[in-house]
Every structure is written in C-alpha cells, then in structure tokens.
Amino acid sequence: MNIIKLSAIDSTNDYLKNLLLKNTLENYTIVTAEFQHKGKGQMGGEWKSEPSKNLMCSIYLNNSTIKLSNQFSINMVVCLAIKKSLNKFNIPQLSVKWPNDIMSGSSKLCGVLIENIVKSKSIQNIIIGIGLNVNQTEFNNLPNASSIKQISGKHYNTDEILIEIVKDIKFYFNFLNKKKLIELQKLYEANLYRLNKVSMFKLADSNLVSGYIRGIKEDGRLKIIMENDLEKDFGIKEISLVN
C-alpha cells in the first residue's frame, strides 16, 4: 500500500487519474489531502470540507474480475467497508443512503465517488474517492451534515481510520473474488437508510412522490414500492431521497 500525502489539491480523484496516465500504479495506491479546492461529489456536486479536519482520499485499484454489468458491486463493497470501519469506532445508527452515502441517524457522515476507467467494454481501473467528516464540527448551510467527532465528542486520527477502511475494502472485495455477489447485495440492502419506511422522494422532473425502499436490483437500481403498491425501479439520476 503506497500512500501519497498532499497538503492541498484540486481533487484527489483527478490527481490519481493523472498519475495513472504517467505511471503504472500498484494496487491500493492512495492519495490523501488536507484540503481539496474542487472536491468531487455525486452527479457533479462539490464536496466541501474544512482544511486538516477530515479524511479526503482516493484509492486506486486495478481490476480484472468485475464486469461492467456488475459495476454497482464496487459501490456496495466500499459503502459496507466504511460502515464496518466506523462501527469499530462505536459510531451509532450507521446506514447506507443509496447509492453511496454513509449516515449516522439522519445525518450524513461520508460521501463516496467511484470512477471506473473503461476500455473495450470492461473495467480496467477503479478510483474510489472518499470524503469522510471526521473532526469538523461546524457545517454552515448543511443542516443534514455531521462528523464522527460531533457525534461522539472524541477527536480521531484520520490515518487510523483510513487503514481500517482499506482493510475492510479488501475484506468485502473478497466477496466478489469468491463469487458471493448475491450475499453482498443482501448485506447492502439490509443496511439501507430508510429501508421499508415510508419516505418522500424527488423525481428527475422535480415532482415529489411517496413510497418506501424495498431494495435494489442487480444493476444497483433502487426498488421503491409506490403509493399504488406497484414496484418501480430508478437509476441514480432519476430519483433522490428527500430528508
């Protein structure tokens, strides 16, 4: 495991992608930053964080086993790994908000951005971006955000948390190596935020609908039981959960 530590960078994901263009990287090459000027979030969003207080990193993986049709399995691996790691630090009420946020109660602790480099219709390389709120305690204009320090009252070493996350990512990737995709999906579904609870959702056209999360399909699409008791499934850009 090779860790590259930077004080400030636009984006750890972009830095790792540029590094990959120039070098052959060993598996689990990791880039961390004390501060990101243009940290990336899901669907083009921006990840904002105070300097030197949180874990901002990107992890490189070479891929030879995961098919393009199963790419959502990477999301499942990473989310379950982060949740498993945070459990070790006794963070309560952890769950996974579809597709890849980590929650404590109704507060967001962590966001994940996975970028797959695809060649000839197969995933060649995987870059896992993680933004975990660790020691930050103020979140202006972000009412649903929190940190593990804010929840527990303790100060944490981000390097120690990173080591646990990498260990647990390896643990869950073994599920894929051993062809345990169905077992992995069941674990992910069991840990879904608002599972089987009536919730409000916002559609791509901004309309609001009511329903409850039933699980996910094999390709990662979210299964929702609508008000008329019919099951519908949605992709990442088609629906979002309203807090």
Image (tube, grey):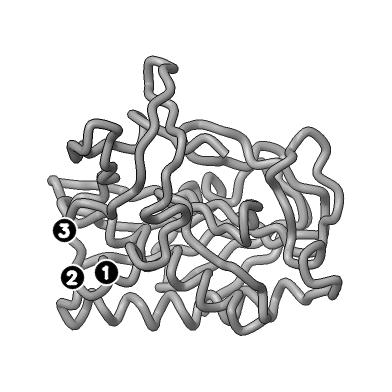
Q: Residues within 10 Å of mark 2 (few under 14, many from 20)?
A: few
Amino acid type indicated by mark 2: Ile
Residue beneath the point at 25% across and 45% down: 223
Q: Position of residue 136 (x, y in %)?
A: 82, 56
CA gap between label 2 and label 1 equals 6 Å
Select label 2 or label 1 by which is in front. Answer: 1
Q: Which residue is mark 1?
A: 186
- Chain-order first, disc 3 or disc 2: 3
Q: Which residue is mark 3?
A: 67
Amino acid type indicated by mark 1: Lys
The image quadrant of residue 86 is bottom right
Q: Is residue 235 above or below residue 58?
A: above
Q: Position of residue 219 (x, y in %)?
A: 20, 50
Q: Is residue 93 visible?
A: yes
CA gap between label 3 and label 2 equals 15 Å
Q: Which residue is mark 2?
A: 182
Circle 3 sits in a helix, a strand or a loop, which is it? loop
Q: Is residue 22 visible?
A: no
Select label 1 or label 3 by which is in front. Answer: 1
Q: Position of residue 148 (x, y in %)?
A: 73, 66
Q: Position of residue 162 (x, y in %)?
A: 62, 74
Residue 131 disc label: none
Contact (Cβ within 8 Å) of mark 2 with mark 1 = yes
Residue beneath the point at 83% across and 37% down: 140
Residue beneath the point at 43% across and 75% down: 169
Amino acid type indicated by mark 3: Lys
Q: Quick one: which residue is furthest to the front in this view?
A: 228
**Between 11 and 201, the one nearer to me in the picture:** 201
